[in-house]
Amino acid sequence: MPKRGRKKERKSQKKQKLVDNWCRAVAEQYGGALEFDEAGSVKSRGAYDQSQSELAASGAETTSDRNHLSVSKLWIENSAQLFSSKRGSWRLEGADKSKMSPESVSNRLEFLPMLGSMTDDMLVQHCISVLVDARHCASNLQHVLWSQDCLLGFTTILQECDERGYIFDVALDLDAVNVAIETASREGLTPTRLLTVIGKLDALFFSASYMLRDKLGRESLQAAHLAYLKGHPLCAESVASFRNKKKTFFRKLDASVAKRFGRTFGLNLETMQWDESDSENPLLTILRCACDESLRLFSGIDVQAAFISFFGDRSKNDSKKAVAKLAGDASAALGPQERGGIEGYGVGARGRPLCPRFVEEWRNSKRDWPCRFYAYATPNKEALAEICQLGSVVEVGAGTGYWSHLLRKRGCNVVAYDKHAGESAEDNAYHRKAPPFIPDIKIGNPEDLANHTRSVLFLCYPPPDSNMAEMCLQYYKGSTVAYVGEFQGTTATRAFERRLLSEYKITRSIRIPTFPDQICSLTIWARRAKTISPLSDAIFLASWPIRCVRCGAHGHPDITRLYRCRACRQNVYCSKRCCKSDAASHQSVHKILNLQQTGCTKFPNSKYFVQVGSS
């Protein structure tokens, strides 16, 4: 057999094992058992009593493409097992099913559930199950048409919910998924189109779970989010293969960058296992799932080609056609961050990260809804332990109370305020009506800090272009501030930063896990014996936590200028020498963020670097 044929056969066998394992895992979960013979056909189903005649009607035994239909048949069996024969049946549309082609079978699967007989709880769980299946078909099996088949069942759920009087408006999200799938079916499923389909599916799921939040309750809602993102269990071969791929990826990184990532995110670099002791921190689990999925899906995408196409930074050996071919359908033009001033983001050093549009959209799909349900900054054990050892805490702008909830679990005494707490939660532009994690968030503003002089002021991701954080410093008379946010970034304002540095001095800085477009950290501040007034630019730059990552130099308006990488926003340099000597580490940071090595050494080219303090 030719080498290409053997490679294709191995790939087909691997996908077959993946589907087989999925069938077994779901069958066992629902009390059944699926067994397979050497040809991949089902021998017995245990507790599952679906009629074999329905499967025979698909023409599975007469078609020439037995392998394709074997996968389709197993998928039908598994899905019927998932929903049980008592809740509905599968229908294959077509006048003569014995002559249906494999493609038509895979395209026209339609589940007809008996929704009217379902209780509300069963209907909600059915809704979640359908979307979990849809995502599994796209993300793991990379068969978006099967995802669309799952969405046919989801459409019937929407109709039933409408008849029962549920407020369940996800039509726009559903249309967006279908458009993405139709585009991929018509023009080919490229890696970037797969990202788009999965991103739209995620938006649909989280929007649906938001609509069902009252039916699910907070704990069930949290469990549904994790079940959806983790998906169905993969076969042992796939798990081992991805673990090896992950190990190879981190071994190729700069050692210091890999260790820093492992320590911050809780990844064991030897076993490639996440720290399971963080199970009570669902936002961190969601972020880890996003890291794993991005590593798996971005491996076939040349992100650097998108940058090259946009900036025109082609070498003499790179023709326009070659660059265009590399970029493919990567939507190489950059997103709206170049125009600045959008959604609270500023310009210059406070601008949004530089990346191709498809990368930006993927990041948004991973971050937006989880942040709305939980918090806009992700805690880890080290950050929570540091705040707990400071003593009693008062938090203003608590949002859902996620950080306060985790601090209380560690024995910390926390009082939480938010101006949108309680009945006014519908006015919250950041969290909407997401269920709170603690029941006693008080309606309050910075003025309430006058009653908490002995507590530590905790500010977590204060909104950009708002004076809330600055007003907190004005009314707070205590001695310690714990601040989670970005300097010269997308939290708080420059006026807040100047006041914080004039009245307090930094005592400790702790890295926390972040989504790819964030650079926030936890910093602890102690009140100065004497306020620095007036605060000159020289003292301001010398006092803040931003330094050259290579030599540790402070900024100075006349002597040393600091420049931040516009792509990763993490690395800051004071000179071309520092930038070049740190190239390996800088490139590793970009690889973790799925940006490869674009512009790492082009210091201080304004396309890639921006002066810190310039805005």
Image (cartoon, rainbow, N blue to C red):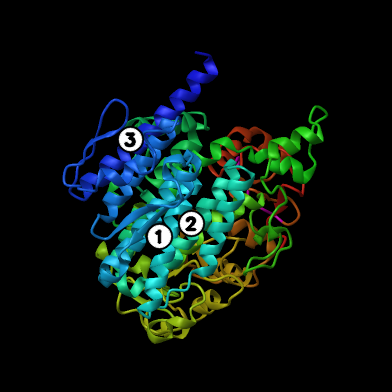
Q: In the picture shown, does residue 253 fall above or below 123?
A: above
Q: Nearer the viewer, mark 3 or mark 1?
A: 1
Residue at horizontal 58 percent and vertical 77 percent from the top: 467
Q: Tell me if mark 2 has few (under 14), some (14-19) or many (20+) residues whose alpha carbon lies within 10 angstroms of its own.
A: many
Q: Nearer the viewer, mark 2 or mark 1?
A: 1
CA distance separating discs 3 and 1: 26 Å
Residue 371 visible, this angle? yes
CA distance separating discs 2 and 1: 14 Å
CA distance separating discs 2 and 3: 23 Å
Q: Give the magenta part as a residue range.
A: 550-556
Give the label on residue 153, or none: 1
Give the amino acid at mark 3.
Answer: Cys
**C-beta proximity under 8 Å, tags 3 and 1:** no
Q: In the picture shown, does residue 147 fall above or below 420?
A: above
Q: Please tell me which residue lies in front, 417 or 296.
A: 296
Q: Which residue is mark 3?
A: 235
Q: Which residue is mark 2?
A: 201
Query: Residue 231: where, in percent of width, then height?
Result: 36, 49
How many numbered tags mark residues here? 3
